[in-house]
Amino acid sequence: MALQAIIFLLLGIVILILVAINGFLLWYFYKTNKKIDTLLEKGKIKDFKNIFLSQKEKNNDLEEQIKEAFLKIKNLDNISERTIQKVGVVRFNPFNDLGGNQSFVIALLDNQNNGFVISSLFIKEGNRVYAKFINAGKSDHLLSKEEMEAISHANAR
């Protein structure tokens, strides 16, 4: 008899635990369902089909914007290959004992070492300015020591 009482007591405890779990699950379901109903009834979105279609439309718009951004980036990358990216400046005195370092050379090169050098020689009678085109780091004209140094400074940056 005592064994049957213990079994009934254990069954009663298990049933009470299951009832408590069931009550918690019903409360949680009700609470979650109420939130979903609030979203679907009071918001602008009436059903899940509209939610998915709206999200798909947003994704398509974003994909188009990303494609446009990548095209612009590629275009800018192509343009930047042909723009001046390297600059080298050398100041010097062409006459050892006269004046200061008022003469200069500026090398302006793109990424492939194409560009030009501008040389300015300051002399007593005035100022002389020369320009030489640079193609792949070399010129068709003879380069002075200072012009080669300016190109070297430009490539070092």
Image (cartoon, grey):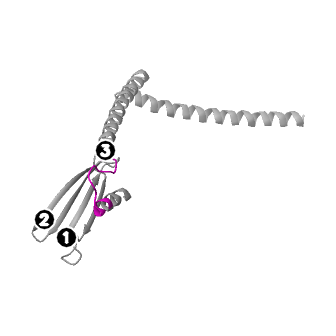
| Residue, disc 2 | 127
Q: Give residue 49's position: percent from left, percent from top.
A: 42, 21
Q: CA distance from mark 2 to mark 1?
A: 10 Å
89 left or right of 57 in image: left
- Which is in the foreground here, disc 2 or disc 3? 2
Name the amino acid type tagged 2.
Asn
Name the amino acid type tagged 1.
Gln
Q: Is residue 41 above or below residue 157?
A: above
| Residue 138 counted in the magenta span | yes
The residue tagged with tag 1: helix, strand or loop?
Answer: loop
Q: CA distance from mark 3 to mark 1?
A: 32 Å
Q: Give residue 147's position: percent from left, percent from top.
A: 28, 60
> Which disc number belongs to residue 80?
3
| Along the viewing direction, whichever of 54 and 3 lies nearer the viewer | 54
Name the amino acid type tagged 3.
Ser
Q: CA distance from mark 2 to mark 3?
A: 33 Å
What span is in magenta? 135-148
Mark closest to the chain's N terminus, 3 or 1:
3
Residue sitting at x 10%, y 67% = 126
